[in-house]
Image: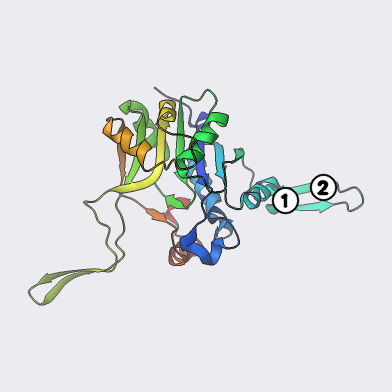
Amino acid sequence: MNLDPSQVPVFILCGGMGTRLREETEFRPKPMVPIGQHPILFHIMRIYAKHGFKRFVLCLGFKADLIKDYFASFHLRNADFTINLRTNAVKVHELTQDLDWEVTLAYTGELNMTGSRVAQAARKYLGNAEHFAVTYGDGLTDANLADEFAYHLTRGKIGTVLGVNPPSRFGEIKLAGDQVVEFCEKPDIADTWINGGFFFFHRKFCNYISEDPGCVLEREPLVKLARDGQLNVYRHRGFWACMDTQRDREFLSKLVESGTAPWLR
């Protein structure tokens, strides 16, 4: 089976309030928090586009208008332009971002949970697609998502989740008696796997989710999918990071500014 990634809709959860990043999300939704020159949402979309995924459905909620305004004026934000103040005619000059993406902006409620947002958006915009992707608006990776999608197709299960090794929040020291023999500032926990937030689903997964505002993707839908033996993991030992705090944002911004951001290579 060889489905074209460009025909696979990618649902991105952009509706949460981002309370752990209050310094930024008091003024804008978390996916619009900048990492370098662009919001983290743009970085996420660029990761997918690099692997051939071009159709995006943004599941909006908190401060949805700011995301809508960003994309409605995307060309003007990324180009020189001339405006005639009498006629309001706009002439766009050279574009700095010439993208062939299709972006649907879907309002899914101010306080709705993740499963509800995906269910609402899928009902309206999944169309005839056999498979779709889901991710959050705050995670970055250098995983090959085209390979994960191919893995998903060959395994024949309803769902596939990117499994990643969680980075430790604390340093680790290995001892021999009273002597430190190895010091790691923040080692990855190599034998532990967590939800990396980059999913692929067959459309049958729509039977597991509900438009009820309280439906949480990570609770009953994914728990039941796993218990039904219909959820596989695609293991990735490379780069993965989630922007939960201001410290996380500063770390990701430094990677971009230094030219060493793994997801941009």
Image point (28%, 69%), residue name: 185
Determine crowd level at label 2: few under 14, some 14-19, many 20+ residues with C-alpha closer than 10 A: few
Describe the element under mark 2 as helix, strand or loop.
Answer: strand
Q: Which of these two is toward me, 159 or 162?
A: 159
Image point (27%, 48%), residue name: 193
Specify the amino acid type for callout 2: Val
For residue 76, which numbered disc appears in the image? 1
Q: Which of these two is toward me, 23 or 265?
A: 23
Determine crowd level at label 1: few under 14, some 14-19, many 20+ residues with C-alpha closer than 10 A: some
Query: Is residue 41 rendered to the left or right of residue 97?
Result: left
Q: Earlier in the sequence, mark 1 or mark 2?
A: 1
Image coordinates of residue 130 in percent, x first then y, are 46, 24
Query: Mark 1 touching mark 2, by CB under 8 A?
Result: yes
User: How is the protein colored in the picture?
Assistant: rainbow
Query: Which residue appears farthest toward the right when viewing the image?
Result: 86
Specify the amino acid type for callout 1: Leu
Image coordinates of residue 234 in percent, x first then y, are 32, 39
Q: Quadrant of residue 225?
A: top left
User: Does the image show residue 244?
Assistant: yes
Describe the element under mark 1 as helix, strand or loop.
Answer: helix
Residue, disc 2: 90
User: Does the image show residue 144?
Assistant: no
